[in-house]
Image (cartoon, helix red, strand yellow):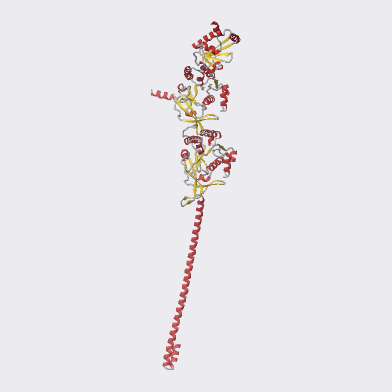
Amino acid sequence: MDTNPDTTTEDMDKEYWELRLYVAGQTPKSVAAIANLKKYCEQHLLGRYKLEVIDLLQHPQLAEGDQILAIPTLVRKVPVPIRKIIGDLSNEERVLVGLDIRPIESKLTR
Amino acid sequence: MQYKKTSSAAAVPTLPKAPTGIEGLDEITEGGLPKGRPTLICGSAGCGKTLMGIEFLVRGALEFGEPGVLMAFEETAEELTANVTSLGFDLPALQEQKLLRVDHVHVDRSEIEETGEYDLEGLFIRLGYAIDSIGAKRVVLDTIESLFGGFPNEAVLRSEIRRLFRWLKDKGVTTIITAERGDGTLTRQGLEEYVSDCVILLDNRVIDQITTRRLRVVKYRGSTHGTNEYPYLISEDGISVLPVTSLKLEHEVSDEIVSSGVPALDEMFGRRGFYQGSSILLTGTAGTAKTTLAAAFANQIASQNKRCLYFAFEESPQQLVRNMRSVGVDLTPWIEQGLLHIEASRPTLNGLERHLVVIHKLVKELKPDAVVIDPISNLINVGNINEVRSMLTRLIDFLKVNNITALFTALISGRTNQLDATEEGVSSLVDTWISVRDLEGVGERNRGLSILKSRGMSHSNQVREFVVTDHGIQLLDVVIGPTGIVTGASRLTQQLQEQAQELAYRQELERKDRELERRRRVLEATIANLRTEFESVEEELRQINSEELTRHQTFTEGRTAAVSEMSGRRAPDHNTKSNNQ
C-alpha cells in the first residue's frame, strides 16, 4: 500500500498533461468551465500541465480537428488516448475520472 | 386599392424553390425543395437517403451554382467519396473548386464524459464556418440522429436541434436532413416535429421478390405537390424519380407516314402506313408472327437509314437475327451500321421502373426514330397490371414527346380473361392496334391479321390471311366462301371447288350443245325418212293412177271393138278411122 502511491506519484511526476478547452465566447458556461478547470489543474497537476483555451468564435476552423460539437469541451491531448469531457466541468470527480487524474493531493491534504 | 392588390398578388410568386436537379423530383415537388428551409428525408436502411442528399449538393453545385456543405455524421469523407464515385460524382474535385465542403462529424459516446451543462454551439460554429467558407446555399445533415447516440442528455439535444433548424432557416440555406425511419413514426427520434416545411418519405418494398423503391412527398408547406407514391431508381447516373416525363398531353404531332415493312399491310391503311411518332400495338396469341412483323418493321426503318431500337424480352439478339433470317429479314447489316440496336434482357432481370429507365437512357443515347418492344406482355411478370399500365403510359408519353414511332407486341390469350386486361390497359393508349390471330379451322391453324383501330386514318375492315414465307410476310388475297372469308386448306378447297364448278359448268354447256346437235340430226333424219316415205307413197299413188288409166283405156277400146263387130265389117274401119282421127 505504501509503495503504490509512491510509484504513481513518480509516474505522475513523469507524466505531462496537455489540455485544450474549447469555448465559444464568454458565455456563463464557458467562463465556469475555464474557472473550474484552472482550479483542478492547480490542485492536481501543478507544473505538469499545459492548458490551451480556444475560443471557437475566433478560430472556427479549429473545431473540425478535434471533432468539437458541444461547448464547452475539454480535450486531453496528452497523455493518450484522447479523452473528451463536455459540460461546464462543475463535477470535479467526474472531470478527474475523465482525465484519468488520481486525486493524490486531495488525499495528502486530507 | 384593388389595382394595388392585384399587382401585389401577381408580384408574390409561389414559394421560392431550390431545384434539386434530381430527375423527376423537381416535377413532383413542382420546382424543387423549399428554398432556405429544411427538408426532412426519411426512410429505412438502403433507401438512398444519403445519396439523395449528395446528389442534391452535387447537382446544386454543378447545375445551379449553389455551393453546398455536407455534414456527415455516419461516414467519413473518404467513404462517401468512394461510394458516390460509381455514380460519376467527383467529390474531391468539387471540394477543390470550393463548391462543396464535406465535414465528417464523429460522435463516440465512449470518448465523451459529461460533466455539467453544455450546448452544441460547437456544431453551429463548425457548420457556420463551413457554410461561410464557401458561401454555401445548401446543407445536408446526414444523419443528425446519430447525435442521439453520442449525447446522453436528450433534453439538451432536442432543444439544440430545434435551435439548429431555426438557425439554418435564419441563415437562409436550403437544408436536407436525413433520418432513419422509425416504428410507426416517420423518424426514430421524432425529428419530423422540428422540420415541418417539407417531408419526403423514401420506401423500399419487396413485392414478389422484386424490389421497388418509392418516394412520397408527405408534406410540403406552402406548395402543391404530387401526392402519389412515385417509384424511383438509383441508376448509374444517380437517382431518378418517375414520372420522368410530364404528364401532359401536349406534344407536337407529325403528318409523316412510316411504312410497316409489309407492303400489303400498308395497303390496309388509308395512308399506307403509320404516322411517325404514333404508337402501335400488335397483339396476338402465341405463334402468330408478332415478332416477325415487328422485325419487318424494324428492318423497314433501318433500310430507310433511320435508327431503330429493339427491346427483345424473349430472345437474344443472335437468336432473333437468326430467326428473322429464316424469313428473309436480314438484320445483320443494320446492326453493323449501327442503325439497329437490339437490347435483350429478361423482364425479371429488373423491376419495371428500371426497364423504363433503361429504355429512357437508351433512347436519349441513341436517338432512334422508332422503338420496338417485344413483348410488353412479359412485363406483367414483373409488376401487376396497374403498374405496367402506368409504366407504359409514361413510356408512350415519353416516346410521343420525342416523336418516336413505337411498336409494342403483346401476347394475349384468347381463352382466359386475365390477359385481356392488358389489352384494355394498353389499347386505349395506343394509336394503332393490329391484331394477329389464329384462325383455327378444320384440322389446321392459319394466321389472320386485322386492324382494330387506327387513329387518324381509314383502314381496311377485312381479316386478311397471311403466310410467313422465305422472303417475309405475305398477305393473301381475300377469298370469300359461303360462310365468310376462308383460309388455309379451306381456301385451297374453295379454289379447287370453284375450278371444278367451272369445269362442270363448261362440260354441261358442251353436253347441251351436243344434245341439241343430236336432236337436230334426229329430226333431220326423221324429216328425210318422212320425205322418203312420202316419195314412195307418191310413187305408188302415181303407179296406181297410171294403171287405172291404162285399165280404163283398155276397157274403152275393148267396148268399141265389140260394138264394131256387132255392126259388121265396117266397124273396124270405122274404128280405125276414128282412131286415126
Measuring from the top left, give residue A84's x and y in whole percent. 54, 15
The number of discs equals 0
Measuring from the top left, give residue B550's x and y in whole percent. 45, 84
* Residue at point 58%, 37% (across, down): B338
The N terminus of chain A lies in which quarter of the figure? top right
Q: Which residue is nearer to you in this view: B162 or B529?
A: B162
Measuring from the top left, give residue B245's x and y in whole percent. 49, 32
Q: Which residue is nearer to you in this view: B184 or B579?
A: B184
Q: Quadrant of residue B10?
A: top left
Q: Which residue lies furthest to the bottom in this view?
A: B568
Measuring from the top left, give residue B447's x and y in whole percent. 51, 46
Image: B529 above or below A49:
below
Q: Which residue is nearer to you in this view: B368 or B37?
A: B37
Q: Which residue lies furthest to the top in this view?
A: A109
Q: In which quarter of the image is residue B81?
A: top right
Image: B354 above or below B96:
below
| Res B79 visible | yes
Q: Residue furthest left?
A: B1
Image: A89 above or below B53:
above
Q: Residue furthest front?
A: A1
| Res A54 visible | no
